[in-house]
Image (cartoon, helix red, strand yellow):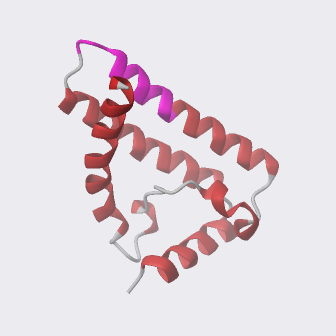
Amino acid sequence: MKRQFLIAFVCLPLSFFVYPVLGQEGQPENLAVIYDPLFWKEELKLKDSQCQSIQKINSEYYQLIESSVKDSSASIPEIQEIAKEGLVERSQKIWDTLHTNQKRKWMKMWQHQYGP
């Protein structure tokens, strides 16, 4: 229970750091992939190998958070920084997993849902 609380405590403030990155339209290199593209597997036409890669990337990210939470010497601000940096790295890895057409589709879906 304590571990779940710590993970929630770390991830919620982290979302406030990442959200402004998403508001920078026209700069796809700064696009953060916060939501898991596996939810839109059919729409993005993800291949099985891409799904497996994304699952592995997600697993590595959550293991990073879990290990930093388990590290009793890490303070909450340090854990938040580790999670924030890990999220940026996760986003870039997932973005690199997508093909050009999938990136365009993702951007259109994102702008339609959250754009002006």
Q: Residue 50 location, x and y as percent?
A: 73, 49
Q: Residue 25 location, x and y as percent?
A: 38, 76
Q: Name above or below for residue 94 compared with residue 63.
A: below
Q: Name above or below for residue 70 compared with residue 6.
A: above
Residue that extends furthest to the bottom in the rendered view of this protein: 116
Q: How many marks?
A: 0
Q: Tell me where residue 60 sits by quadrant.
A: top right
Q: Residue 77: within the magenta?
A: no
Residue that extends furthest to the top in the rendered view of this protein: 72
- In front here: 64 or 99? 64
What is the quadrant of the N terminus in the image? Answer: top left
Q: Tell me where residue 101 sits by quadrant.
A: bottom right
Q: Residue 15 location, x and y as percent?
A: 32, 53
**Residue for point 33% across, 71% down:** 23
Per the picture, the main secondary structure of the magenta-coloured stretch is helix
Q: Residue 62: within the magenta?
A: yes
| Residue 1 placement, left or right of 81 | right
**Residue for point 43% across, 77% down:** 114
**Residue for point 44% across, 27% down:** 64
Q: Tell me where residue 105 sits by quadrant.
A: bottom right
Query: Where does the magenta region start and end?
Result: 61-73
**Residue for point 49% across, 78% down:** 113
What is the quadrant of the C terminus in the image? Answer: bottom left
Q: Residue 36 location, x and y as percent?
A: 56, 54
Residue that extends furthest to the front in the rendered view of this protein: 1
- In front here: 65 or 30? 65
| Residue 20 placement, left or right of 42 | left
| Residue 2 placement, left or right of 59 | left
| Residue 94 placement, left or right of 48 | left
